[in-house]
Image (tube, rainbow, N blue to C red):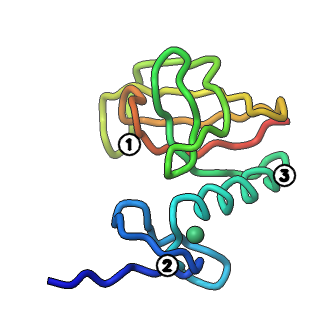
Amino acid sequence: MTTTARVSDCGHVNDATPSIASRPVASGWQRMCADCTIDYERKLFAAIPVGGRFTGYVTGTNPRAFTTWPGDRLGTVYFVRRRPTNHPSIGRCVRETVYVVDDEHRHWSGTRFDGYATAGDVITLTRRD
Ligand SMILES: [Zn+2]
């Protein structure tokens, strides 16, 4: 049996399938290795203006981190507010507002409606300052 090396659009050869993912980029979709995905997402994140949004993941515990898709840390979750609520489509649930500070001391927050953010949960944050 022969194995074909996987070459991603970023030009790096990867044998480990999980390290390559298709990412939405300005020109459409590209297959990028994890390192290039981290670079790409870090540049996007750094360029978000006040009021702009960025989708990442809540990972880890105590303190929880806000990360890129491959799990690279972008900021720290410093506060979470939880309130029971009624959502128009999912009904009785918990509205969880997650507050994040990044390494440049910029503040972000975002809301989830499906309960408690645990490892790997996707969330979209809005830059507050
Ligand atoms: Zn790459």
Disc nearer the start of the sequence (1/3): 3
Q: CA distance from mark 1 to mark 2?
A: 41 Å
Q: Is 101 above or below relative to 6?
A: above
Q: Which residue is mark 1?
A: 88
Disc nearer the start of the sequence (2/3): 2
Question: What amino acid type should be assigned to the residue bearing mark 2?
Answer: Ser
Is the CB of mark 1 within 8 Å of ligand 1?
no
Give how far across and how far down residue 5 sits, in percent. Answer: 37, 80
* Foreground label between 1 and 3: 3
* Foreground label between 1 and 2: 2
Q: Which residue is mark 3?
A: 49
Q: CA distance from mark 1 to mark 3?
A: 30 Å
Q: CA distance from mark 2 to mark 3?
A: 30 Å
Question: What amino acid type should be assigned to the residue bearing mark 3?
Answer: Pro
Is the CB of mark 2 within 8 Å of ligand 1?
yes
Q: Is 124 above or below relative to 114?
A: below
Q: Splitting the image into 4 quarters, where does residue 12 fall?
A: bottom right
Classify mark 1: helix, strand or loop: loop
Residue 69, disc:
none
| The N terminus lies in quadrant | bottom left
Question: What amino acid type should be assigned to the residue bearing mark 1?
Answer: Pro
| The C terminus lies in quadrant | top right
Say left or right for 5 vs 99. left
Crowdedness near tag 3: few (<14), some (14–19) or many (≥20) residues, C-alpha within 10 Å: few
Give how far across and how far down residue 81 sits, in percent. Answer: 55, 18
Q: Are marks 2 and 3 in contact (CB under 8 Å)?
A: no
